[in-house]
Image (spheres, coloured by chain):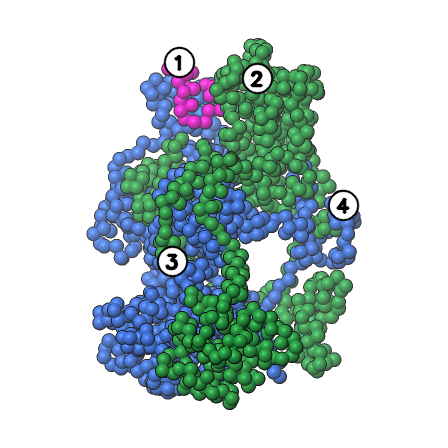
């Protein structure tokens, strides 16, 4: 089992030679040749290191497992050669060239550490011809060592400005060209300036073009990465016959073109025992729990295997399922029912749980209908035939066609995109191709019924016709569509309704924001860029653990230009986003201030009797309420409390009576009933009745907190039920009662 | 005992917490039984029977999915002679009785409804259950509903729906707004919805409930003006005579946000958005396991034991030094006690579960990277079901304004926003495109607003070039066959004859689920099983399977079918249906063995006069794979050229053309 081996091995050898030869395809050899001359100082060298680190990072995180290698082809092996540096270490003895490793190896953190320590030379200028010669010689030696490689790539990072003042010898270039051809090595050059800064740059560009190589700048290096080391999965073909009419079928072959499952593979980790780092295997235990109530001290009969007992100081509880022969098995179960401890306290009843191990054969299944359980044995379930493929090995039938724009992005409900291409193995190819072109001309998308195999559920799939831009192949992109059952019902109010105000100035501001953040070129849309960001975040933990801090880590951080910062600031001013809680707190504080300032005396002047005006000073009332309460005079406390509430209500009455704290009133009401002091509360209600705003609102509000205390609730009350009912409505009922 | 009672209430409240609530209130007045289209009172199509039927369908549909366990349902009949209310919360409410109070649905409750639906003589049945007809106070009805909902729904309540079926268009008269009973009823119903009198506050915080009014009656006899009163309660109130069963689902189905995340446009500029998945693949409920003999539920525990390779256990580098918290060697471990190991970059990295949880906790949110034209994004290369985002003002206010201005401009300029998205704290960051959607059809799952579409990573995509070179390029025949215009025309005709103007998912129920639901209904004794397999098969084909190919679809007009058939006939002439067997492993092996033969075939390609083709400018008709093959055979150096144009250029240069 390869999984076990990978974990138990003390050390995974990086050397290709040491690996077991279980592969089906040879590995790929990639030699990275870096110019570390004085000519690379500054940005070029920084970009170079970052690109190489990114390339290595990607390979480190996506190193294929042994199992993958069997199906997915060879590994990408790397070697690093540096030229134009102050050190010399290479078999040819060329000065200023450093060939780091003795073998080609999978990308390692060591290589990344080596790169992070690398800096451009202060005196030497890099000569790319020398670098290439040493690199080719180095690769040749690896081949002579018995290396068998599928693809061989030489990736040169230079700006070629080291050769500005000393043109490369023509013979050297001719030698390199012939060796490249003889060894079937592909040359990639990264970092040449465009337009060329010097003749040496033009010369190198011409040389690369002549020899079938490619040049890249740092911004489009993603293309190089995908070319070099695209993760190759075995492309398994499936064959389907699209039934376009009764008994008329077109032959298609199909691949899973885009599938999320592929990049999720990078997360694979292996669970191990933390004490020994040995791989673990999973043991699944099935059991039933029977709850019985027993008199204190009694013991259960233990079901099939006898009662369970025993405890552990490691938190594994008392449950030990017993085997069929009654022997206890120490499986280290955690007792789930810790909460039953102490339940029996004070009673004679004690709950006991009988755990019985279950053989997998005794398992039966059921489904819930509401909260009822419907248990179905296998026979019952089998008696219902739920297969809708009608004994067909796969289903691929045309349902209808719809205009291209009818397949809305919201309907793209699958997790993968399949590509169907006419099968070329039989003569039906022209017909299938013509069908695709017919759809294309009609600007239509086909809706088909699709079942991958005989046991799969039928699905709805949309097929969009396309012609491959390079290969001219007619093909159909297939994506899953939702069924009626998949649509979730929602009730979103229309945006027009919830935010109808759209000022031209604000819209212009948003335009400006969009313009300032508009992507240049492929920008973040490039696969490589996107993946880089995602990788860095997903694998942050690994980097932390290994202790490698590289410039790549920082690449995920976004830096804004001054203009961008300004526009963000501008938008922030025009569209104020306010913390709701803070806003509410400020509102409350504001209200408190208002309450403190309100002149209740003046408000009530002429309406109330003199003795009542006396203590209507809200802030003072609040203070006095607290003092009185602490002194034990609850009645006075409540009286003052009610006056404080009255002051609050006056403040809120004109604009938002709903802000009145009804809970506080309810509390006061209950207190007055309990202590037989209904007058205190009813007096307040009487005062409120004089305020028109409050009165109108209270008439609508059915809250019992706004209902005067009646004689039914408290005998001392002077308000009867009938009067209470009409309290807020009947104008004729003046405050005669008070 | 009092304590025990309190515990019971608390337990029930905990059990009922975090569930949706739907409370049906059916008018049981005599009027509801007298409007049967046949003219006969208490007929099976009277408003009351139709209301109960709709509730029954709702309950059955809910029960067959797992949703029922997260949904509380109650049915109250008002205007009855009998009064059966909870004295603690009745507050004088009279003339109303539950069919069943608010709680999780089970088989018995549904059977009770079924009894009312299929019980036969409705008059007697109603008299027996509810005594007869009278009139109740609407304010009491509303306040009793409100208290019932808040007492039954636990501490944390999800969306509440109050659904009233009646055929009384206005019990309060024309001047209803001054009617005290009406005003109090309205206030109570607004409390159920959590509606604030202040419109701005209502906007800021989404409503926690919805009161729906279904006025049952003949839509030809009543018009909108009759609904003035009910529309003050529910602005969507309408008159329904039939087909309102599914509408109940839509009215009660307020979707809960998948996540609420900050959308950051830049430093110090972020607003909150709620993320909804408006389309989600619905699957069968998960079965539970029981002991076949005892019927007790089966629980399972998973433990992990180190593999025994016969070697003595020893401490290794990276192994946990302090293992005092772990059981002694040999005792199985639980999942949280394990570590993880990954071999990367020549290093064995050991990560404990705790570290993993800590490190993989990314801050959640949407972070803008840049904007780009919508045309640059190929939405057909998607990897996940799209999500819908809406402004959310619970924490920050002002979100709606910024959102709608952004949406307006993105829509007008056809711009997408490329963002990084972490939906939940422990989710991996993903790269997404936010695209504006202006189409609206909530019934078909389309909503105006911004949609989040996940973009694929480089590794999600198969190396198409390689796939084309090795698998998808024509392996036989020299070039990709020229397209026969006759077939293209036929395909075009076929496409036109079976064309629909739009795709409507609601027309395609999932057949598998429909059959599965029927199975559950039968097992719950709600349907009399037609035990014959023929009947089941018939239902499968005719009833549940609605995703039929056009040639089996009787809904398409015969004239169009005929046109499509004659168009498809052209394909039959060329023997398009030539059967190809799936390659078996053996056959694949044969294919491999044939490889040398294939190679020799390529040698034969010398027969193709590449120079002549080049001179005639016909190289463009060859595929890239063939161009490469022929160029290789003719020893033409084309370097790393992969593009067709480059290859043609290389070949042309070789021949000096």
The answer to whether residue A97 is left or right of residue A182 is: right
Which sits earlier in the primary sequence, circle 4 or circle 1? 4
Relative vertical location of residue B225 with respect to residue B435 in this rendering, above or below: below
Mark 3 lies on residue: A493
Q: Give the Cα distance between marks 2 and 1.
A: 34 Å
Extent of the magenta region: B636-657
- Please, which chain is the residue tagged with disc 2 on? A
- In this view, the residue in front, B130 or B134, is B134
Cα distance in 3D space between marks 3 and 1: 69 Å
Between label 2 and label 1, give the one nearer the viewer: 2
Q: Magenta includes A72?
A: no
Characterize the local packing of mark 3: few (<14), some (14-19) or many (20 or more) Cα atoms within 10 angstroms: few
Residue labelled with disc 2 = A161
Mark number, residue A280: none
Q: Which residue is mark 4?
A: B316
Q: Give the alpha-carbon distance from disc 3 to disc 4, as whole Å.
A: 61 Å
| Residue at x 66%, y 67% (from the top left corner) | A336
Q: Which chain is blue?
A: B
Q: Which chain does the numbered disc 1 sit on?
A: B
Q: Mark 1 packing: few (<14 Cα in 10 Å), some, or many (20+)?
A: few
Numbered mark located on residue B656 in the image: 1
> Which structural element holds mark 1?
loop
Residue B178, percent across and down? 32, 75
What element does badge 2 sit on?
helix
Q: CA distance from mark 3 to mark 2?
A: 63 Å
């Amino acid at each position: 089992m390869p999984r076990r081996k990978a974990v138990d091995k003390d050390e995974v050898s990086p050397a290709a030679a040491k690996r077991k030869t279980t592969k089906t395809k040879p590995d790929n050899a990639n030699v990275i040749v870096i110019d570390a001359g004085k000519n690379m100082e500054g940005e070029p060298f920084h970009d170079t290191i970052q690109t190489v680190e990114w390339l290595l990072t990607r390979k480190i995180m996506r190193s294929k497992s042994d199992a993958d290698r069997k199906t997915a082809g060879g590994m990408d092996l790397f070697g690093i050669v540096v030229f134009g540096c102050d050190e010399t270490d290479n078999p040819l003895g060329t000065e200023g060239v450093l060939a780091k490793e003795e073998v080609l190896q999978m990308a390692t953190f060591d290589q990344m550490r080596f790169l992070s320590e690398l800096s451009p030379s202060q005196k030497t200028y890099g000569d790319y011809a020398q670098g290439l010669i040493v690199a080719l010689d180095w690769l040749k030696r690896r081949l002579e060592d018995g290396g068998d490689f599928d693809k061989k790539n030489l990736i040169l990072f230079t700006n070629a400005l080291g050769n500005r003042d000393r043109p490369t010898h023509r013979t050297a270039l001719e030698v390199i060209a012939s060796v490249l051809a003889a060894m079937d090595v592909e040359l990639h050059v990264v970092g040449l300036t465009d337009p060329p800064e010097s003749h040496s740059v033009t010369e190198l560009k011409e040389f690369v073009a002549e020899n079938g190589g490619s040049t890249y700048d740092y911004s489009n290096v993603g293309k190089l990465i995908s070319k070099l080391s695209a993760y190759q999965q075995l492309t398994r073909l499936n064959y389907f016959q699209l039934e376009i009419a009764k008994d008329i079928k077109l032959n298609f072959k199909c691949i899973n073109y885009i599938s999320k499952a592929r990049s999720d593979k990078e997360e694979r980790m292996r669970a191990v025992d933390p004490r020994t780092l040995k791989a673990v295997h999973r043991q699944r235990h099935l059991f039933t729990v029977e709850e019985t109530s027993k008199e204190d001290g009694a013991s259960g009969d233990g079901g099939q295997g006898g009662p369970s007992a025993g405890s552990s100081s490691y938190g594994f509880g008392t449950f030990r399922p017993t085997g069929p022969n009654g022997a206890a098995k120490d499986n280290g179960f955690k007792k789930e029912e810790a909460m039953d401890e102490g339940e029996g306290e004070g009673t004679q009843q004690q709950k006991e749980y009988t755990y019985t191990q279950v053989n997998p054969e005794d398992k039966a299944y059921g489904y819930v209908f509401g909260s009822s359980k419907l248990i179905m044995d296998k026979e019952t379930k089998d008696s219902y035939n739920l297969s809708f493929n009608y004994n067909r090995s796969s289903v691929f039938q045309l349902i209808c066609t719809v205009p291209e724009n009818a397949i809305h992005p919201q309907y793209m409900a699958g997790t993968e995109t399949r590509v169907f291409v006419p099968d070329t193995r039989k003569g039906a190819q022209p017909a299938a191709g013509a069908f695709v072109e017919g759809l294309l001309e009609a600007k239509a998308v086909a809706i088909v019924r699709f079942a991958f195999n005989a046991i799969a559920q039928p699905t709805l799939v949309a097929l969009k016709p396309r012609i491959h831009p390079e290969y001219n192949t007619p093909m159909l992109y297939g994506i899953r569509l939702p069924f009626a059952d998949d649509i979730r019902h929602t009730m979103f109010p229309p945006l027009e309704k919830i935010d109808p105000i759209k000022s031209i100035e604000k819209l212009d501001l948003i335009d400006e924001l969009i313009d300032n953040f508009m992507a240049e070129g492929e920008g973040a849309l490039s696969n490589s860029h996107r993946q880089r960001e995602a990788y860095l975040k997903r694998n942050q933990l690994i980097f932390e653990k290994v202790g490698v801090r590289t410039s790549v880590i920082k690449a995920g951080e976004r830096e804004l230009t001054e203009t961008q910062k300004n526009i963000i600031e501008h938008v922030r001013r025009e569209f104020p986003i306010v913390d709701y809680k803070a806003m509410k707190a400020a509102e409350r504080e504001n209200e408190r201030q208002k309450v403190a300032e309100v002149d209740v005396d003046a408000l009530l002047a002429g309406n109330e009797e003199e003795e009542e005006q006396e203590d209507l000073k809200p802030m003072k009332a609040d203070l006095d309420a607290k003092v009185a309460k602490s002194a034990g005079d609850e009645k006075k406390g409540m009286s003052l409390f009610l006056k404080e509430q009255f002051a609050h209500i006056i403040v809120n009455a004109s604009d938002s009576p709903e802000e009145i704290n009804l809970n506080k009133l309810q509390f006061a009401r209950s207190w007055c009933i309990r202590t037989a002091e209904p007058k205190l509360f009813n007096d307040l209600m009487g005062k409120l009745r004089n305020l028109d705003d409050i009165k109108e609102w209270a008439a609508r509000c059915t809250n019992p907190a706004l209902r005067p205390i009646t004689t039914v609730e408290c005998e001392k009350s002077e308000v009867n039920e009938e009067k209470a009912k009409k309290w807020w409505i009947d104008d004729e009922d003046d405050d005669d009662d008070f | 005992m009092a304590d025990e009672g309190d515990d019971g209430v608390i337990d029930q409240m905990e059990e009922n917490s975090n569930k949706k609530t739907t409370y049906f209130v059916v008018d049981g007045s005599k009027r509801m039984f007298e409007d049967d289209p046949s003219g006969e009172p208490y007929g099976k199509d009277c408003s009351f029977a139709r209301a109960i039927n709709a509730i029954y369908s709702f309950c059955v549909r809910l029960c067959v999915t797992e949703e029922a366990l997260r949904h509380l349902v109650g049915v109250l009949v008002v205007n009855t002679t009998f009064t059966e209310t909870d004295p603690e919360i009745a507050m004088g409410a009279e003339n109303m009785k539950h069919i069943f109070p608010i709680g999780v649905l089970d088989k018995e409750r549904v059977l009770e409804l079924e009894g009312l639906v299929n019980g036969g003589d409705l008059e007697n049945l109603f008299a027996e259950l509810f005594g007869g007809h009278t009139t109740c106070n609407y304010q009491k009805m509303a306040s009793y509903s409100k208290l019932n909902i808040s007492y039954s729904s636990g501490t944390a309540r999800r969306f509440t729906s109050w659904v009233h079926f009646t055929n009384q268009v206005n019990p309060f008269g024309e001047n209803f707004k001054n009617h005290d009973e009406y005003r109090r009823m309205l206030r109570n119903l607004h409390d159920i919805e959590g509606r604030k009198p202040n419109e701005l506050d209502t906007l800021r915080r989404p409503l926690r409930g919805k009161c729906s009014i279904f006025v049952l009656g003949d839509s030809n006899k009543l018009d909108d003006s009759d609904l003035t009163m009910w529309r003050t309660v529910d602005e969507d109130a309408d008159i329904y005579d039939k087909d309102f069963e599914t509408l109940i689902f839509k009215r009660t189905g307020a979707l809960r946000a998948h996540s609420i995340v900050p959308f950051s446009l830049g430093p110090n500029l972020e607003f909150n958005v709620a993320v909804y998945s408006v389309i989600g693949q619905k699957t069968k409920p998960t079965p539970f396991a029981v002991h076949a003999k005892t019927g007790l539920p089966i629980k399972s525990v998973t433990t992990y034991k180190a593999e025994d390779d016969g070697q003595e256990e020893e401490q290794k580098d990276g192994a946990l030094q302090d293992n005092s918290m772990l059981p002694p060697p040999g005792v199985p471990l639980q999942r949280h006690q394990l570590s993880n190991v990954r071999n990367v970059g020549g290093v064995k990295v050991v990560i404990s579960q705790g570290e993993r949880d800590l490190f993989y906790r990314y801050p959640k949110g949407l972070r803008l990277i840049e904007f780009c034209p919508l045309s640059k994004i190929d939405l057909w290369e998607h990897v996940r079901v799209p999500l819908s985002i809406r402004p959310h003002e619970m924490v920050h206010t002002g979100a709606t304004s910024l959102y709608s201005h952004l949406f307006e401009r993105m829509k007008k300029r056809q711009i997408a926003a490329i963002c990084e998205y972490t939906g939940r704290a422990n989710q991996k960051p993903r790269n997404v495109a936010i695209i504006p959607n202006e189409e609206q059809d909530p019934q078909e799952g389309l909503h105006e607003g911004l949609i989040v579409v996940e973009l694929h990573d480089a590794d999600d995509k198969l190396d198409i070039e390689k796939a084309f070179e090795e698998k998808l390029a024509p392996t036989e025949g020299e070039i990709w066959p020229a397209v026969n215009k006759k077939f293209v025309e036929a395909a075009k005709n076929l496409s036109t004859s079976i064309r629909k103007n739009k795709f409507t998912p609601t027309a395609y129920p999932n057949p598998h689920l429909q059959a599965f639901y029927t199975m559950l209904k039968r097992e719950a004794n709600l349907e009399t099983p037609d035990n014959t397999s023929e009947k089941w098969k018939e239902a499968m084909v005719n009833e549940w399977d609605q995703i039929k190919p056009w040639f089996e679809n009787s809904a398409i007009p015969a004239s169009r079918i005929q046109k499509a058939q004659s168009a498809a006939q052209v394909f039959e002439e060329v023997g398009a249906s030539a059967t190809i067997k799936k390659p078996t492993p053996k056959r694949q092996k044969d294919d491999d063995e044939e490889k040398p033969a294939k190679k020799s075939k390529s040698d034969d390609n010398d027969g193709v006069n590449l120079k002549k083709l080049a001179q005639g400018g016909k190289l463009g008709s060859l595929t890239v794979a063939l161009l490469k093959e022929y160029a290789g055979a003719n020893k033409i150096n084309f370097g790393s050229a992969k593009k067709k144009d480059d290859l043609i250029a290389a070949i042309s240069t070789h021949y000096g053309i």
